[in-house]
Amino acid sequence: MEAVAHLRNNPTSTRKMRLVADLIRGKKVYEALTILKFSKQEASTKLEKLLKSAINNWEQKNDGSKPEDSELVVKEIQVNAGTMLKRFLPAPQGRAYRLRKRSNHVTIKVDSKIASAPAVEETVEAEA
């Protein structure tokens, strides 16, 4: 069973968040947590919290299973643009500069390698 966690309207730009998200895509969950913990970017703390939430969601779905035993992996991570606040900043000679305060939406999907492998084998045996 895969588990999903969402982070909506995070007040950082999508580009900054994607730089950190690319570091953990496809990694094992605990390896990804250590990468995020020692990363210097501000986005890494928010992604770390979101990944912990996804792990907890996976534990809730799979009663009796421990994430350490089932080799959890960051299956998918998406960073999409959120709403943009548009403001004006006063500029010289009566002008105004446009400010765009960007936000993003992040979705993390976590799944175990062990649980997905037997399901594939069962379908192959059923066909034969």
Image (cartoon, rainbow, N blue to C red):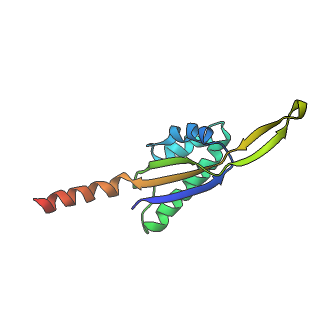
User: Would you say 1 lies left or right of 6 here?
Assistant: left
Q: Residue at x 20, y 60 (%)?
A: 123
The residue positioned farthest toward the front in the image shown: 94
- Where residue 100 appears, as percent x and y from the top left, is 71, 42
Residue 53 in the image: above or below residue 100 = below
Q: Quadrant of the C terminus?
A: bottom left
- Where residue 29 appears, as percent x and y from the top left, is 48, 48
User: Would you say 16 lies left or right of 76 here?
Assistant: right
The residue positioned farthest toward the left in the image shown: 128
User: Would you say 19 lies left or right of 66 here?
Assistant: right
Numbered marks: total? 0
Residue 112 in the image: above or below residue 57 = above
The residue positioned farthest toward the right in the image shown: 93
Residue closest to the eye, 105 or 66: 105
- Specify whether residue 68 is in view: no
Residue closest to the eye, 40 or 80: 80
Q: Quadrant of the N terminus?
A: bottom left
The residue positioned farthest toward the top in the image shown: 93
Residue closest to the eye, 10 or 31: 10
User: Would you say 71 lies left or right of 102 here?
Assistant: left
- Where residue 56 appears, as percent x and y from the top left, is 53, 61
- Specify whether residue 110 is in view: yes
Residue 118 in the image: above or below residue 60 = above
Residue 40 in the image: above or below residue 45 = above
Residue 38 occupies quadrant: top right
- Where residue 43 appears, as percent x and y from the top left, is 64, 43
Q: Residue at x 15, y 63 (%)?
A: 126
Q: Residue at x 52, y 44 (%)?
A: 32
